Amino acid sequence: FRWKRIRNVHQSRCYRTLCPVGPRVATSEVQKSGVTCINSWISMKLFCLLSAHSAAIPGGRAPDRPVPSVAADCAVDLLFLVDGSWSMGLEGFLRAKAFVKRVIHSLLQTSPSVLIGFMQYSDTVHVEFTLGQHAGYTSLVRSIDAIKYRGGNTNTGGALAHVAQLEFRAETGSRQEVPHAVVVLTNSRSRDAVAPPAQFAREREIFLLAVGSEQVRAELQSIATPLNALPFSDPLDLYNKVMELRSRICSLNSQGCYSRPLDVIFVLDSSASIGRQNFRSVKEFVKDSVSQFDIDRDLAQVAAVIYSTKPRALFHLDTYDSESRMKRALSTAPFLGGLALIGRALGFVADELLTVHRGARPGVRKVVVVVTDGLSADDVVGPVTTLLSNGVSVILVSVGDANCRLWITAQPSDVISIPSYNTLKHYMDNVIWRICEESKQPTSPCLPNPCTNGGMCSLLTGSYHCQCVGWDGPHCEHR
């Protein structure tokens, strides 16, 4: 287990941002749409569970394929690190304890393999109970209810360092064969630095999640990275984070495609139809997605293309073997404007990026991810069909009312419908899961054809051979 190799598999639930479930929508109308509505015991709000063949309903779009449920059992050693300082306040501390109890309830309903510990910190760290000291929900709740608010100064950095150094050891009840996770709950800014001890914890393969008020968002992100920070705007919003937190915790031992070789190409719409602000959102989405892969010459290679009237490669599959350099290149990607020619961009990908001399590896699964919200001004059916016939998976991340019907006609590997750019980041886990699913499909070293200049690819046992006419070299690249 490595802290970086994480994918989050959310339950197939679409909240109000995804479907018009609420007092203004009749139950009969929702049921006709193939969606089942139930009450959430956490937030007392309605949400909907997608059926396997549910269609988009008025006012929102649902994914064409449901997202898999969280694993029934998540074996994790989980420590709650709760701020007990004066800045947190008694009311905030009691609210944090109530939140912890709800998270534990949601975990233990289906996951008896979770071991839970609780620590309170301020000037110093107090171990209220260690991992596995209490078994069962009733015993855990009784122990949490008995915890007293201590007060003091907020030293979150020191608390993180303490946890990383001392708490995940065999003598403290920690298991070495399961992931280790810490959930930090705080509403106050730390008096000491949090970034260095948080980095130290990650280097020791401890997965950090941070929950706190909107006022300390920056500090939460320093602790747990922006992807794993869960800021809340008000007390009710805090309790709405329970299922999201549970999903993240229970995804830690899901190994996805991180041990599989994979070539991924992100194709980003940079046309006038998307606009500058939305283009920035797409770049952030792809940067966050890159973090979910183990970038390595032998494992995951990533390329990126931007397009409008003309496509442009930001970097090829063999350009970078560093996540940080990829992110810098994405950050500086220019907004192009102009028409959206998706077909031309996909043809460019097939001709210029999915080639051996640009880093494409024969026998390695290849996935093209297109992020767009605009209609294409050219034909996309032909280029998509060409990619699919050459063993390349095509995933469309369709924002708003993009041209889904046209793409479904072209039969891409998958279409992930997203209501708006504001919700794009919440679908990253779904996109990563689809990419990982594609990585498991069988592939041929001759698809796409690694031979250049008209060479023919012949399969050998565990390999391939290029038959060249008028050319020489392993891939017919020399005269």
Image (spheres, grey):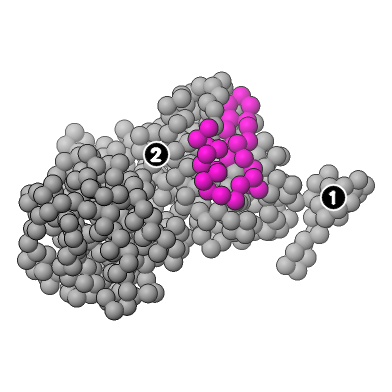
Residue displayed at 17% across by 65% down: 126
Number of labels in the image equals 2
- Viewed as shown, does residue 298 lie left or right of 355? left
Circle 2 residue: 424
Instruction: Report whether residue 470 is seen.
Output: yes
Residue 10 percent coordinates (x, y):
35, 53
Q: Secondary structure at mark 1?
A: loop
The residue closer to the viewer here, 177 or 187, is 187
Vertical position of residue 24 compared to residue 449: above or below:
above
Q: Residues within 10 Å of mark 2 (few under 14, many from 20)?
A: some
- Quadrant position of residue 171: bottom left
Residue 132 percent coordinates (x, y):
23, 75
Residue 322 belongs to magenta span = yes
Check the picture and name the quadrant holding the C terminus.
top right
Q: CA distance from mark 2 to mark 1?
A: 43 Å
| Label pair 2/1, CB-CB below 8 angstroms | no
Check the picture and name the quadrant holding the N terminus.
bottom left
Amino acid type for the residue under numbered disc 1: Cys
Give residue 244's mark. none
- Viewed as shown, does residue 340 lie left or right of 55? right
Vertical position of residue 349 compared to residue 162: above or below:
above
Dot 2 or dot 1: first in sequence order is 2
Circle 1 residue: 476
Vertical position of residue 127 compared to residue 420: above or below:
below
Residue 25 percent coordinates (x, y):
21, 36
- Quadrant position of residue 304: top right
Vertical position of residue 24 compared to residue 53: above or below:
above
Instruction: Report whether residue 370 is seen.
Output: no
- Quadrant position of residue 99: bottom left
Residue displayed at 22% across by 45% down: 189
Residue 48 percent coordinates (x, y):
27, 47
Residue bounds of the magenta highlight: 304-332
